[in-house]
Amino acid sequence: MNRDSGVTIDLETGLVQPAVHRPSPNQDARPADCAIDLVVLHGISLPPGAFGGPWVDRLFTNRLDPAAHPYFREIAHLRVSSHLFVGREGHIVQYVPLHRRAWHAGRSSHQGRPDCNDFSIGIEMEGTDESAYTEAQYRTLDRLLPALMAVYPGIAADRIVGHCDVSPGRKTDPGPCFDWERARRAVLSNRDHGRETTRDRVG
Ligand SMILES: [Zn+2]
């Protein structure tokens, strides 16, 4: 358990606190002996550009009504999830325990290693490529990212990347409006990982 940052992580249950816990059926076991050493940040909004609705929650729990919006017809069949979702107000919803595999990155690779879902934690930020993320969301990352790094030492500062980095050409999220410098502020000031912080994120 790490309590330094106000976010706690129970390694046995894989649960983050404080968070609303909404188990997604879209999860399975990680490969045996697979260390968690990457964070993939995403952006999502449903329907695209709208915030605060129940639709992301319904997508991640396989309850999205394809008739509720034209766009939903295209995506309602998807079986996807992320470990964590950070809403515009900065609140956290957890869909998959951290030690389990969430289905967020799809076809992906990081430094030549394929299938990032195997070894990463997926965090969906409610947002779009065209709009700024909120200060409340960055404040949540300030607490969350150091807590993750404390319990999963393989997550160095340069191993916090975007979906755009692991699925280039296919994905653009969290998008050009995501402020990586701001997001990394707490990570950079984390004394345990201070040496890791001068490198750019891996593209
Ligand atoms: Zn994504």
Image (cartoon, helix red, strand yellow):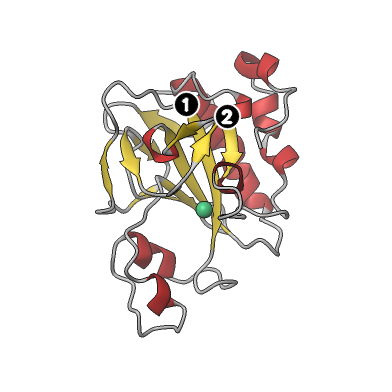
Q: Which mark is residue 159?
A: 2
Of the two numbered discs 1 and 2 on the same chain, state the one appearing first in sequence.
1
| Disc 2 element | helix
Secondary-structure class at tag 1: loop
User: Which of 101/11 is in front?
Assistant: 101
Q: Which mark is residue 37?
A: 1
Residue drawn 47% across the image and 78% down it: 71
Say if 121 sits above or below 62 in the image: above
Residue located at (66% from left, 18% from top): 196
Q: Is residue 147 left or right of residue 64?
A: right
**Mark 1 neighbour density, 10 Å: few (under 14) some (14–19) many (20 or more):** some
- Vertical comparison of 35 with 90: above or below: above
Most foreground residue, 128 or 52: 128
Taking the spot 61% from the left edge, 53% from the top edge, the residue there is 169
* Residue 167 image offset from top left, x and y in percent: 54, 47
Q: CA distance from mark 1 to mark 2?
A: 7 Å
Judged left or right of residue 162, residue 7 is left
| Disc 2 C-beta below 8 A from ligand 1 | no
Q: Position of residue 126 (x, y in %)?
A: 55, 59
Q: Quadrant of the N terminus?
A: top left
Name the amino acid type tagged 2: Arg
Which amino acid type is marked by label 1? Asp
User: Label 2 neighbourhood size at 10 Å, few (<14), some (14-19), many (20+)?
Assistant: some
The image shows residue 89, relative to residue 58, as above or below, that is: above
